[in-house]
Amino acid sequence: MNKIIFQEVLICNKSVEKSKNINVLLIVLLRSLTLFFHTTNKISSYLKSALLLVLVISLTSFSCKEKESKENTVTSNSGHPSLIITKQGVKDIRSNLGSIPIFDKTLATTKKEIDSEIKNGFDVPTPKDYSGGYTHETHKKNYVLMQKAGVLYQILEDDTYAQFVKDMLFEYAKKYPTWPIHPKPRSYARGKLFWQCLNDSNWLVYTSQAYDCIYDFLNEEERNTLETDLFRPFADYISKENPQFFNRVHNHATWGNSAVGMMALVMDDDELLDRALNGVKDVNFNPNKKDNDGGYIRKDGQKIGFYANVDEPFSPDGYFTEGPYYQRYASYPFLIFAQALQNKKPEHKVFEYKDGVLIKSINALLNLSDSGGDFFLLNDAQKGMSYFNASLISTVDIGYHFGGNDPGLLSIAKMQDEVTLDDAGLAVALGIKEGKEKPFVKKSIELSDGANGDEGAVGILRSYGLELVFKYTAHGLSHGHFDKLSFALFEDGEEVVQDYGMSRFVNIEQKGGGNYLKENKTWAKQTIAHNTITQNETSQFKGKYDIGSKHHSNKYVFSVANENVQVASAKEENAYPGTKLHRTMVTIKDEDYENPYVLDIMRVSSENTNQYDLPFYFLGHVMQTNFAYNKLNVPEVLGKSDGYQHLFKEASASANGENIKLNWLLNNKFYTYSAINSNNDELIFGRIGANDPEYNLRNEQTLILRKKNAKDALFVSVIESHGTYSPVSELAINAYSNIKNISVLYNSKEYTAVQIETKNNKSKVFIISNENNDKDAAHKLTINNKEYTWQGTYTLTENE
């Protein structure tokens, strides 16, 4: 009989193991106990009753605890929706509607938009166009509409929105299997809905959110149809069938990884999720293959997948190596997938990964914008992109919700005047409603580059309305420019000395299908297009990505403790073999004048004799120069290659060894550029636009300082903002420079000293140690029988 009981217990164990269900456990154990009682006569009826009671109580307690645990798990980790808007989030949103103004406003605007689109109907056209074309823009519009309609269904409990999403998805499910690869051949990874897999991934990132929202609106058969005919083939196409796209460290792959990962979370597909996080495994690749921008697809030994894209492009400070324009673009997939992963599978602790770098990246990105919110133009970037872009609304809301409720982010959200219609957006709306916002203060900051923070940096000096952006980074992947030690200058949110940005009219079909124009490579990426040194009319690193991507500039000094004297200094020793560049930029606030000015010191030392060109891309209208120039009747093309072929030479002059001054007007403000020159230096007024038959380039001006037949060279200049003009009163106030003269008092391998004399007969001397950047080092230097002593890398002293 004991043998029978033992066999029964084995059967019980197998049943429990197979079902993993507490109800089965309860039934099986009761069955075993009953059998035991019937076959054991030696136990009294009282003892049997007691044993049975203990068993029932224990199992009931265990059952209740497991039920409670399962309920908690369902609330946070399972069920639908669970990615961006969660079940609990839906409840909280509904309970607060009508009392959260910014959320209510966003909801009303979204409802009006989607109601109109539902009324007009939708189209799912056969793909054939580049960016800006009808089919491209229609498929792009469709995924946004589906995502918004899905959220409206959850919040408003109106089946109309779910039916709209369902109908569109089934139309895609019917047509997708019949579509070939997109007919436009430009991309290294062609999509099916769009000309590149990148845009296909955009579609899936948004559509996964829509599917999550209407998941329970569909029956099992409908879900199977969508997953079999559309979602799984779609995910396989952008990953398994295009590993050259998916297995990269690049913003393209980030979109692909996030797209597959988010759909995996909706479908509870662990294999697909692993593919998203860790890449498509066991795929051979050609290490010499490049993308359309000239960047390598993948390096030997490089990790792949979502985590690799968090590890490598982000520095520990949160700086994204491609620059803020593409960080803005990539921030959406990075953060939206992280949000979904945190909501659905919090055990991954994605927001803690790499010391919380995804949250840090939000603060870094916001600091890479001017006072008006426009992002600085570092590498490929379009002017005017700002944190009012839709992806930044999501970025700010996610940063607030998952990053510790930083009240500074609420002030940005309040300016954006819009929130996401999800849990994060609700958190922001409640924070604003409760008056928790504080100003997001942008201070001077240095953001390191490189996965470990040791590949240069971007230095931003902010001083009383001036913002100076100094670039001494790594190359920036395939979107990088050959512009080591370049800078740009802003005042009150307006560009004063510009970085050109990229040559592209995004999503404007007339201009190359909205894609990069050939001038992006022949002009915008070239060194001469930037405010930095070009040697021998040849771009840094010979204009070759293969070389430039191996090197980075080096930080030397970044000191901003004294807001009246802020210093950023960096070195570049690989751009031109045998030549070393060292640039130091200083913002100085003189108590005698309203506005600060910028001191710029560029040292060049070389083993060979060279020609050095230093352009100055000022924006505005020339008012006056203190040097005579010869304006050509017919502009000449300045050179033959490396960007020079796109510059007209409009006027020129020979320097006489005295300071030159260029005075100009921009946005009713007067500026002056004062520079030290040597005898026979050449001054060139240039203008962009040569060899540009399709008018793809902006016809903007520059002043180029040229030194010929020089091994070592020193370029020193001062940039001032000093006056205003009123078109109403027609009065010009402080229209002329406050700088009387600048001169080099001392220059050696060890030290450089510059004197700045102002018109009130005062002077200052700035000295920097060129070889020792120890902040505690003591220095002593005698110049013209006067001894200067100081501690640290530099000093600014008043001359008596």
Image: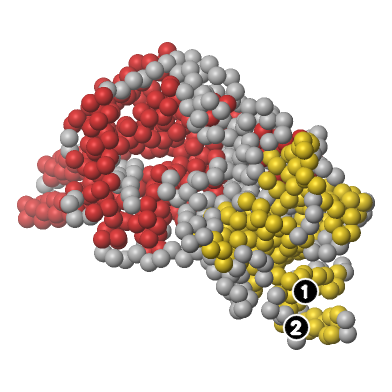
Within 10 Å of the Cα at label 1, are there few (<14), some (14-19), or many (20+) other Cα atoms? many
Mark found first going from the N terminus, 1 or 2? 1
What residue is rendered at 53% in x and 16% in y?
183
Q: Which residue is mark 2?
A: 799
- State if disc 2 and disc 1 touch (CB < 8 Å): yes
x, y percent for residue 87 = 24, 45
Which label belongs to residue 247?
none
Within 10 Å of disc 2 (Cα), the crowding (few <14, some 14-19, many 20+) is few
Amino acid type, label 1:
Gln
Q: Quadrant of residue 655?
A: bottom right
Q: Marks 1 and 2, how far apart in space?
A: 9 Å
Residue tagged by mark 1? 755
Question: What residue appears at the point 15 percent right and 43 percent down from the top-left corner?
Answer: 30
Q: Residue at x 45, y 33 (%)?
A: 202
Going by the numbered disc 2, the residue's amino acid type is Asn
Is residue 83 shown above or below 726?
A: above
Vertical relation: 431 (above or below) 205: below
In this orientation, does residue 40 appear?
A: yes
Q: Is residue 533 above or below residue 650?
A: below
